[in-house]
């Protein structure tokens, strides 16, 4: 598009240099070649989709014709002999260029629209296949039939996952992207639940709790499939409206916007509208003040800040009316002061609500980390103790209600619509999985010797724990937004290109992980996600954001996050070749970080330098190991999968070392800057450091910790199918 704009806007001078003519020719030929490639893809799509073949073919024909016209109009081969004629110019037919550009734009747009329709149809067709197989699965009566149909179901779900993953990456609307991610997460987790719940129901066909457990999984999968189609087709089933619930954060944002608009226009809103906005906002705070889990002190603080906001708003209205009475065109000075006071009081309210919601969530996550009700339910079920199962079910239900309410409060202070959607998803997940765990525990208590009933309970407990882990990450993202850090990963585009990094990949075959392999990668992937988030958090604590150590650590975290997305079948890395290339680039960036650490260590005293150099040597060895592994060619699916596993494990170890170094180096960097400013020379600073108490390596590295606990309890090895 930029090239076409250049051609159209080119100035028609009587005489052009050879360099200008050559540049025009190159641009025109580049446009023609790009159009040819684009049209080839469109024609291939048309050949595979008969119902749109004619429309797509016509659009491709028009695009090719426009590209050829542009190539002809910029063909300056005959212009050189005629340069002596002042009346002959290359762009004498400017109208023809404009027409060709318009034709190209309209035809390319049509090709893209038709291609989009085809993608949507593919997703709908894939969903329909999944639904049909899901119906068959729900009605099977024998293990043999179940295994056969589930195998087909697994293949269809893999296809659906790839189609929806690509669609999610293509979505520009962040709300739709968040909703798609939530629906796909449900399908991912429910697939394993469906397997064990169905097997349990087949083993114990007369057990009512097993049937309830199974029915809930099937219902949730159908709802998630329907949500995906709603997002893809931008339609609502049964006329439902998916409007997000009104959050306090959005209410505060709208109220502040209305108040600040009064500076420029005293008639932008009415006093009644402004006070109405505030009262609606205050009413939403009742979710906090009416909660049984809100302390008396917190409740009083929120009510006090609401009352202060009302008083300031009332003063604003009085100043506003006075300004209008004297026909002021903009807010006078006294009104400006009240505007500032009103905004400050509403900010104080937002800060208090954030503190309450985040504090409660953090406390709940700490309590849930002990997993007492889950462990007790498993033990009671295995003993066949229905009474104990009933007792611990009540405790789990109470925890579930607390988590659901806390997710609702987090939604109020989330700060962005995508995070609101994620909070709603978390709320729905806890609301659904809690009763499913209870029904699975009841089934085990009725059949305490059943291995499949025990496995089924384990799967639902793991889903609960996985959602708790997701909630911890959500909490961190909400804090990032509140503190002014978006928490979004910066894109790190490093896919294979011709030339550098690709020589060792020429004979390799690009493959995608199947569903079973992605499942086995889930634990490692989740650890990468947590580590990359921890690295980002440590990096943001540095005062010097342009420090080499900071920039290179951020790059490592971003690349590791891309690798995490690969384990989920999402993101920019589509094949194993993409992953291996990313690992190679990551290793090079890690070695650059080692070089920066070596430079940084030159200003340190012996013991401090020893700590940094020891960890740096570990990092060098890991980066070299990662680089060699990424460059080593492999043959066969098993060897490729092992290479993927090794690359991700080594990357995890690289991030763990970086995470251990960042807080220590940050502390030293701040101390060095402080002492450098107060001492007369670096030599004086070094002598003072040598005289100070040595910093022990153990304290330096273990004081902050790696920030990632073992996830064995959260992500157990999942076997796709197992024998009767």
Image (cartoon, rainbow, N blue to C red):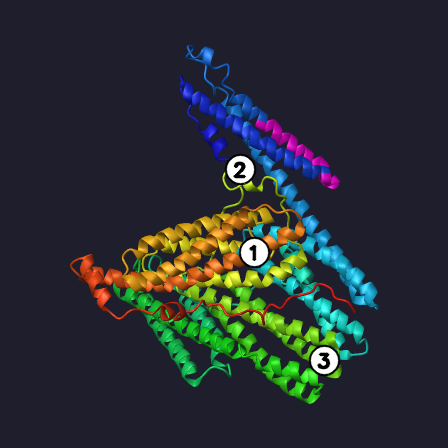
Name the disc covering residue 3, or none. Answer: none
Whether 9 is drawn above or below 85: the answer is below
Q: Position of residue 473 (x, y in %)?
A: 50, 66
Label 2 sits on residue: 498
Quarter of the image holding residue 301? bottom left
**CA–CA distance in space, label 1 to label 2:** 25 Å
Label 3 sits on residue: 444
Q: Position of residue 243 (x, y in %)?
A: 57, 63
Please state the extent of the stretch shown in magenta in the rendering. Answer: 48-67
Whether 43 is drawn above or below 642: the answer is above
Q: Position of residue 445 (x, y in %)?
A: 72, 83
Local SS, label 2: loop
**CA–CA distance in space, label 3 to label 1:** 38 Å
Q: Nearer the viewer, mark 1 or mark 2?
A: 1
Callout 3–callout 1 Cβ contact below 8 Å:
no
Name the disc covering residue 646, or none. Answer: 1
Q: Residues within 10 Å of mark 2 (few under 14, many from 20)?
A: few
């Amino acid at each position: 598009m930029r090239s076409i704009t250049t051609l159209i806007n080119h100035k028609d001078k009587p005489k052009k240099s050879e360099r200008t003519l050559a540049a025009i020719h190159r641009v025109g030929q580049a446009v023609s070649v790009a159009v040819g490639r684009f049209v080839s893809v469109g024609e291939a799509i048309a050949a595979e989709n008969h119902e749109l073949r004619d429309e797509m073919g016509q659009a491709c024909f028009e695009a090719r014709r426009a590209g050829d016209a542009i190539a002809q109009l910029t063909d300056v081969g005959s212009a050189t002999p005629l340069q002596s004629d002042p009346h002959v110019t290359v762009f004498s037919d400017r109208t023809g260029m404009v027409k060709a550009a318009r034709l190209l734009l309209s035809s390319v747009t049509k090709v893209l629209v038709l291609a989009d329709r085809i993608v949507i149809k593919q997703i709908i067709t894939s969903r329909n296949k999944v639904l049909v197989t899901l119906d068959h699965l729900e009605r099977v009566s024998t293990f043999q039939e179940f295994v056969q149909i589930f195998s087909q179901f697994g293949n269809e779900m893999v296809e659906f996952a790839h189609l929806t993953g690509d669609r999610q990456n293509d979505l520009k609307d962040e709300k739709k992207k968040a909703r798609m991610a939530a629906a796909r997460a449900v399908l991912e987790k429910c697939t394993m639940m469906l397997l064990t719940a169905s097997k349990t129901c087949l083993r114990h066909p007369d057990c009512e709790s097993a049937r309830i457990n199974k029915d809930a999984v099937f219902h949730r999968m159908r709802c998630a499939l329907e949500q995906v189609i709603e997002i893809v087709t931008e339609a609502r089933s049964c006329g439902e409206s998916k409007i997000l619930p009104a959050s306090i954060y959005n209410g505060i944002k709208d109220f502040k916007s209305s108040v600040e608009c009064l500076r420029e226009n005293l008639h932008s809103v009415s006093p009644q509208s402004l006070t109405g906005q505030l009262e609606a906002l205050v009413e939403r705070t009742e979710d906090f003040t009416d909660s049984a889990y809100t302390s008396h002190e917190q409740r009083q603080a929120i009510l006090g800040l609401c009352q202060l906001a009302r008083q300031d708003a009332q003063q604003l209205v009085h100043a506003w009316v006075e300004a209008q009475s004297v026909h002021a065109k903009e807010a006078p000075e006294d009104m400006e002061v009240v505007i500032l006071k009103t905004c400050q009081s509403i900010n104080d309210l937002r800060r208090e609500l954030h503190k309450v919601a985040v504090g409660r969530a953090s406390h709940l996550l700490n309590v849930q980390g002990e997993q007492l009700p889950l462990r007790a339910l498993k033990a009671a079920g295995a003993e066949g103790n229905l009474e104990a199962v009933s007792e611990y079910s009540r405790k789990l239900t109470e925890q579930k209600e607390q988590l659901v309410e806390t997710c609702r409060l987090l939604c109020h202070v989330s700060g962005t619509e995508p995070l609101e959607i994620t909070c709603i998803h978390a709320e729905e997940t806890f609301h659904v999985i809690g009763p499913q765990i209870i029904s699975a525990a009841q089934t085990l208590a009725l059949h305490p010797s059943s291995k499949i009933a025990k496995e089924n309970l384990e799967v639902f407990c793991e889903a609960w724990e996985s959602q708790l882990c997701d909630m911890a990450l959500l909490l961190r993202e909400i804090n990032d937004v509140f503190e002014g850090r978006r928490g979004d990963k910066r894109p790190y585009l490093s896919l294979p290109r011709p030339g550098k990094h690709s020589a060792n990949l020429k004979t390799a075959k690009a493959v995608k992980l199947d569903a079973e392999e992605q499942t086995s990668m889930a634990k490692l992937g989740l650890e990468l996600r947590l580590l990359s988030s921890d690295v980002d958090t440590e990096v943001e604590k540095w005062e010097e954001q342009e420090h080499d150590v900071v920039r290179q650590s951020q790059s490592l975290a971003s690349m590791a996050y891309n690798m995490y997305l690969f384990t989920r079948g999402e993101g920019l890395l589509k094949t194993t070749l993409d992953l291996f290339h990313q690992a190679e680039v990551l290793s090079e960036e890690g070695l650059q970080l080692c070089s920066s650490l070596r430079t940084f260590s030159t200003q340190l005293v012996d013991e401090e330098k020893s700590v940094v150099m020891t960890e740096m040597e570990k990092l060098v060895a890991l980066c070299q190991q990662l680089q060699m592994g990424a460059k080593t060619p492999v043959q066969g699916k098993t060897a490729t999968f092992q290479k993927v596993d090794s690359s991700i494990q080594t990357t995890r170890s690289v991030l763990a070392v970086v995470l251990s170094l960042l807080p220590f180096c940050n502390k030293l960097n701040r101390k060095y800057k402080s002492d450098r400013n107060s001492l007369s020379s670096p030599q004086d600073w070094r002598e003072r450091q040598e005289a100070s108490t040595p910093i022990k390596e153990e304290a330096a590295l273990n004081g902050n910790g790696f920030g990632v606990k073992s996830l064995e309890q959260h992500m157990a090895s999942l076997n796709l199918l197992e024998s009767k």
